Image (tube, rainbow, N blue to C red):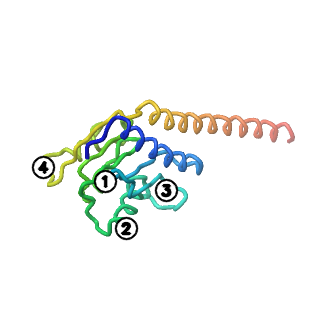
C-alpha cells in the first residue's frame, strides 16, 4: 500500500470528483474512493438528503461498494481516500471494515473522528488501528467545503432579506 505522491493525488482527485457529485445535489461535498492493488474498488459521496438516510456518508457508500466488489466485509490491503477527515461514525465503520490505511485531504474541526476531535482510528484501546496520512490536496479539499458553506450562508441571508422585503410590502398593502 505504498503510493507515490502522484498516485495519492490521483486518487484524491477521484475522491474530489465524488464530492462534486454531492455538490451537484446540494449535499455537503465530501467524496471517497477505496483502492486495492492500485484499482478503485469503491466510490462514494454524501447522499443523506438525496436518499433521506442519515448514514449515507461518502465513506459508508464507498465501503458498501467495496464490500460488494471484493465479496467480503473485510477490506484488508486497501486504502480509503476521502476529501475530509472521517466523522466518528465513518471512523468506526472504517475500523469495522478492517481498512488498514486512510488518507484524507483536510481536517474536520467540528466532527473529526480521526484526529481533530477524536482519535478513533489510532486509539490503542481498540483492536484495529489505521495508518493515517493527511494533507493530500488539502487546499482543494477544504475549498470545496468552504465554498459550499459560504454559498449556503449567502442563500440564507438573501432569503431573509426577501422575506423582510415581502413583509414590508404586505404591511404597506394593508
Which residue occupies the extreme right position in the image?
A: 173
Place of residue 147 in the rendered image (x, y in percent of width and height, measured from the top left): 55, 34
Left or right position of 166 against 72: right
Q: Which element is circle 3 on?
A: helix
Residue depth check, mark 2 versus mark 3: number of the one nearer the observer: 2
Q: Which residue is mark 2?
A: 68
User: Image quadrant of residue 141?
Assistant: top left
Q: CA distance from mark 1 to mark 3?
A: 30 Å
Left or right position of 122 against 112: left
Q: Nearer the viewer, residue 25 or 33?
A: 33
**Position above or below: 93 against 82:** below
Q: Which residue is mark 3?
A: 48
Q: CA distance from mark 2 to mark 4?
A: 29 Å
Q: Nearer the viewer, residue 85 or 12?
A: 12
Q: Which mark is residue 125?
A: 4
Q: Answer yes or no: do the residues labelled 2 and 1 have beta carbons within 8 Å?
A: no
Q: Which residue is mark 1?
A: 37
Q: Which mark is residue 169?
A: none
**Position above or below: 73 against 150:** below
Which label's residue is closer to the chain start, 1 or 3? Answer: 1
Amino acid at each position: 500500500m505504498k503510493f507515490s505522491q502522484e498516485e495519492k493525488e490521483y486518487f484524491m482527485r477521484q475522491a474530489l470528483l465524488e464530492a462534486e457529485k454531492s455538490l451537484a445535489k446540494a449535499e455537503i461535498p465530501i467524496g471517497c474512493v477505496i483502492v486495492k492493488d492500485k484499482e478503485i474498488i469503491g466510490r462514494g459521496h454524501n447522499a443523506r438528503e438525496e436518499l433521506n438516510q442519515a448514514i449515507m456518508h461518502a465513506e459508508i457508500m464507498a465501503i458498501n461498494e467495496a464490500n460488494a466488489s471484493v465479496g467480503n466485509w473485510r477490506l484488508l490491503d486497501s486504502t480509503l481516500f476521502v476529501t475530509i477527515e472521517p466523522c466518528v461514525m465513518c471512523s468506526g465503520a472504517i475500523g469495522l471494515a478492517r481498512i488498514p490505511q486512510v488518507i484524507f485531504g483536510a481536517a474536520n474541526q467540528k466532527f473529526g473522528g480521526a484526529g481533530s476531535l477524536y482519535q478513533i482510528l489510532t486509539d490503542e484501546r481498540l483492536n484495529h488501528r489505521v495508518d493515517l496520512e493527511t494533507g493530500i490536496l488539502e487546499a482543494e479539499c477544504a475549498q470545496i467545503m468552504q465554498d459550499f458553506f459560504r454559498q449556503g450562508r449567502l442563500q440564507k441571508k438573501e432569503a431573509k432579506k426577501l422575506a423582510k422585503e415581502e413583509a414590508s410590502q404586505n404591511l404597506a398593502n394593508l
